[in-house]
């Protein structure tokens, strides 16, 4: 079975470095002239998938914006995941789940087991109940050829008090998370399937970002992150960076041609500034 890391590396080589976040915020629905209900949600999501699913490497639905519409919203999320996969994009479900024991296993079953209607190529996960608590999710991902992106150095200022705190080892909490990710990927000759989430707006870091896995970098565009800053922030690890943008791209909709043009421009800029993986 091909690993998620191998599939992601191939997708970035063929389609370029871009993850597009599907964030159906009520404001965006209004700007697209859509109602803030399950029907508007579906038109927004499937229009985006139809426009970009055969163009970009990764589509990242934000689960919360679907969940807010209840069971009808979850049904839309299921159809969005299926449509994106059929179009050839990898699906990264942004759920940021993190729990312990049987609950963590239940999340793994929901989002990573191929028999689930919500099964995606990868998920985001929160390690702040302890990185070891994510073992059921990580183990399930590796078993099924899927991936996990672990929150590590996020852009929100509130995260710094936790992520930059010193652990008993003397390392920062973020540093311990990065080390644990590197350990999980150590036996992988190519790109590992366990990645880290590192915000584009962190400015700089002294942490070792060489984890032999993908680095999801949200915040490019409207949130203030600049592709031109990423080589400085990530150094040699920039080769594994997957920039993510949502509002900057989705704000040009709802015309599919405008969405495609915006995505193509971002991919071109990433090729120029970061290089395209081989």
Image (spheres, rainbow, N blue to C red):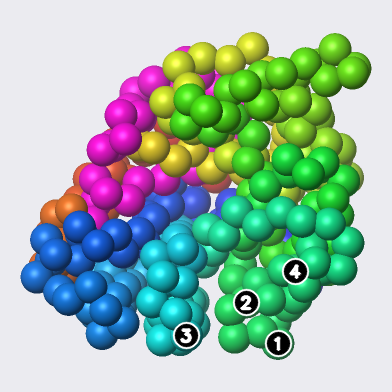
Mark 3 or mark 4: which comes first in sequence?
3
Residue at 20%, 66% (x, y): give it.
29
User: Label 3 vs label 4: CA separation?
Assistant: 20 Å
CA neighbours of label 3 inside 10 A, class few (<14), some (14 to 19), many (20+): few
User: In this orientation, does residue 129 appear?
Assistant: yes
User: Label 1 vs label 3: CA separation?
Assistant: 19 Å
Mark 1 touches mark 2? (CB < 8 Å): yes
Q: Is residue 274 magenta?
A: no
CA neighbours of label 2 inside 10 A, class few (<14), some (14 to 19), many (20+): many
Mark 2 or mark 3: which comes first in sequence?
3
Residue 119 image label? 2
User: Label 2 vs label 4: CA separation?
Assistant: 9 Å
Residue at 85%, 12% (x, y): give it.
170
Residue 71 image label? 3
Is 274 placed left or right of 134 in the picture?
A: left
Residue 235 quadrant: top right
User: Label 1 vs label 2: CA separation?
Assistant: 7 Å
> What residue is shown with label 1?
115
Is 41 placed left or right of 85 in the picture?
A: left
Give the label, 4 or 1, closer to the camera: 4
CA neighbours of label 4 inside 10 A, class few (<14), some (14 to 19), many (20+): many
Mark 4 or mark 1: which comes first in sequence?
4
Give the label, 2 or 3, closer to the camera: 3
- Label 2 residue SS: loop
Mark 4 touches mark 1? (CB < 8 Å): no
Near-viewer residue (253 or 33): 33
CA neighbours of label 1 inside 10 A, class few (<14), some (14 to 19), many (20+): few
User: Label 2 vs label 3: CA separation?
Assistant: 17 Å
The stretch in magenta equals: 221-250
Residue at 73%, 43% (x, y): give it.
127
> What residue is shown with label 4?
108
Give the label, 3 or 4, closer to the camera: 3
């Amino acid at each position: 079975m091909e690993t998620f890391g191998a599939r992601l590396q191939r997708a970035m080589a063929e389609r370029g470095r871009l993850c597009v976040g599907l964030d159906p915020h009520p404001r965006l629905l209004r700007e697209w002239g859509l109602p803030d209900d399950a029907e508007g949600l579906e038109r927004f999501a499937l229009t985006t998938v139809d426009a970009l699913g055969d163009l970009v490497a990764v589509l990242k639905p934000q689960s919360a914006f679907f969940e807010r519409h209840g069971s009808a919203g979850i049904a839309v999320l299921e159809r969005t995941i299926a449509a994106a996969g059929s179009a050839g994009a990898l699906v990264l479900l942004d759920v940021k789940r993190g729990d312990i024991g049987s609950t963590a296993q239940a999340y793994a079953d929901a989002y990573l087991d191929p028999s689930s209607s919500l099964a995606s190529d990868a998920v985001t996960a929160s390690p702040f109940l302890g990185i070891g608590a994510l073992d059921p999710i990580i183990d399930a991902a590796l078993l099924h050829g899927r991936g996990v992106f672990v929150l590590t150095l996020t852009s929100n200022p509130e995260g710094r008090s936790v992520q930059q705190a010193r652990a008993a080892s003397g390392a920062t909490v973020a540093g311990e998370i990065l080390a644990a990710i590197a350990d999980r990927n150590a036996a992988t000759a190519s790109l590992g399937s366990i990645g880290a989430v590192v915000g584009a707006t962190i400015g700089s870091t002294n942490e070792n970002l060489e984890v032999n896995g993908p680095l999801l970098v949200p915040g490019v565009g409207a949130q203030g992150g600049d592709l031109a800053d990423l080589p400085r922030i990530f150094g040699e690890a920039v080769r594994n960076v997957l920039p993510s943008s949502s509002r900057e791209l989705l704000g040009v909709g709802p015309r599919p041609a405008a969405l495609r043009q915006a995505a193509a421009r971002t991919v071109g800029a990433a090729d120029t500034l970061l290089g395209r993986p081989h």
